[in-house]
Each structure stands twice: as C-alpha cells, then as structure tokens.
Image (cartoon, coloured by chain):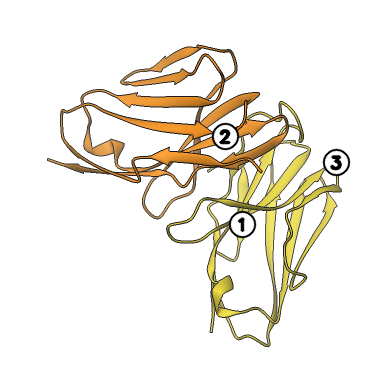
Chain colours: A orange, B yellow
C-alpha cells in the first residue's frame, strides 16, 4: 500500500533561520495537501498542490510539488515563534488521503 | 471556530462503558470523516461518509461504530474499548468525498482516555 514519509521528524530552529520539511510518497499522487497543527490544537489546512512542479507561496512559506508528483517540500524563511507546531502532509492518491507522521517544529528565540 | 464542532472535548471511560462522540458541521459539506490521532503516529483515517453513505472503513475494530444520520452530523459509538484506544479523535468534513475532495476542515477533537 501507499507509504508517506516525512522528514525530519523534529526540527529545532533558531528564530530568524530558514528550514525545510519534506514529504515523500511511494506512489504517484493526484494532489498533496499541507496542514499545520499547533500544540494542543487541531490540524488546519494550509495549501493544496495539484500540478507537477507547482510552487506556491504564502508569505514566508513556500510549497513545492515534485515533477514526478511523488514528493513535496515546505520551506519556511525567517522562522518566527508563531511557526511552532507540527506540519503534516496529506498525500492524495486518487481519493485516498494518507497523512505523514508530521514534522514537529520547535523555535528557540 | 472551524465550522466543525465536536463534543465532548474530553472523555474518560472504563473498558466496559458505552459512550458516543458527536460531530456537527455547519459548512454545508457532503463528506465527513473520523480520524484517530495517537502520539508519535500519523493521523489514521477510520471512516468516511459521503452523502450519508459510508465509503471507507479502514479496518477499524467493531468496538467503534459510526453513524451518519445526515450530511451535517456524524457520531462515533464506543463500547468495550481498550486502553490502547486512548487518543485524540478528530472529525473532519470536506465539500465532497473521493477524488478531488479538497481541503479537510477539522474539529477541535475529542480527547479520549480509556482506563
């Protein structure tokens, strides 16, 4: 069956630094979604990527979908304390959405 | 306010109890989902309902019994649970189910502890 891997599992970042989290699927995807879950909260939708090679930006967040539609990345620039939380990718393989285990981000001032 | 409301927010039950989790969405969506979130594990899809019909049962033990009386309401009936069933149970909705379902709107979750 489909496997979805997210790396790294944990990311400790100094405030102001950049970091990237990656999502890799064992199967070709129809689309990929990204969610953020703050500590004690619930997952909140960030973005959906559909096209091969697609790049979307939301302020300091840049999302990319791989050419083969099997992987994706989320890059955050100038990390702020508000970026704390766990970032999940949801890999949609033609109607079956499977989540990765998430990257837990800790920001130190 | 996400438009998806879950009750109760916290539930403690014994292994022999029967309880229910409730989810209500005010978004006019046609698909509703139950997910289980355990520590250090990916979100696990349990059930999917699309236009009140169950379209997905992800090999969930029969001690979890879903009910979807209409497109706005979803229940998860619990009976004779095990301690390993302790987790955060998240309800979600989307405009439609299946291919191109679009973004999921999650409720705040019901934190379940089984003693």
Which residue is identified by label 2?
A26
Query: Horizontally, is B33 left or right of A83 in the view?
Result: right
Alpha-carbon span between mark 2 and mark 3: 30 Å
Which residue is identified by label 3?
B51
Compared with A21, A62 (above or below) is: above
Compared with B81, A4 (above or below) is: above
Q: Position of residue A63 (x, y in %)?
A: 42, 21
Task: Rate crowding at label 3 as few (under 14), some (14 to 19) or many (20 or more) other CA atoms within 10 Å.
Answer: some
Residue nearest the viewer, comparing A66 with B22: A66
Q: Chain of mark 2?
A: A
Task: Rate crowding at label 1 as few (under 14), some (14 to 19) or many (20 or more) other CA atoms within 10 Å.
Answer: many
Alpha-carbon span between mark 2 and mark 1: 33 Å
Compared with A78, A40 (above or below) is: below
What SS does tag 3 mark? loop
Which numbered disc flags the more N-terminal residue, 3 or 1?
1
Q: Chain of mark 1?
A: B
Which residue is identified by label 1?
B6
Residue at image location 55% in from the left, 25% down from the top: A70
């Amino acid at each position: 069956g489909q496997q979805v891997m997210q790396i790294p599992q944990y990311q400790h970042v100094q405030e102001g630094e950049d970091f990237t989290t990656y999502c890799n699927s064992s199967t070709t995807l129809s689309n990929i979604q990204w969610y953020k879950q703050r500590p004690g909260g619930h997952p909140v939708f960030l973005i959906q990527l559909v096209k091969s090679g697609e790049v979307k930006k939301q302020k300091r967040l840049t999302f990319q979908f791989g050419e083969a539609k099997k992987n994706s990345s989320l890059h955050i620039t100038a990390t702020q304390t508000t970026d704390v939380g766990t970032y999940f990718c949801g890999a949609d393989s033609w109607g079956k959405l499977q989540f990765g285990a998430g990257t837990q981000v800790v920001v130190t001032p | 306010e996400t438009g998806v409301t879950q009750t109760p927010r916290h539930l403690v039950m014994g292994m022999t109890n029967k309880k229910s989790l409730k989810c209500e969405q005010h978004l006019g969506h046609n698909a509703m989902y139950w997910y289980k979130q355990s520590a250090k594990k990916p979100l696990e899809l349990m059930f999917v309902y699309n236009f009140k019909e169950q379209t997905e049962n992800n090999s969930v033990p029969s001690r979890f019994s879903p009910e979807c009386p209409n497109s706005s309401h979803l229940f998860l009936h619990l009976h004779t649970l095990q301690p390993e069933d302790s987790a955060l149970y998240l309800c979600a909705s989307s405009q439609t189910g299946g291919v191109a379902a679009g973004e999921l709107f999650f409720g705040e979750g019901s934190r379940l502890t089984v003693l």
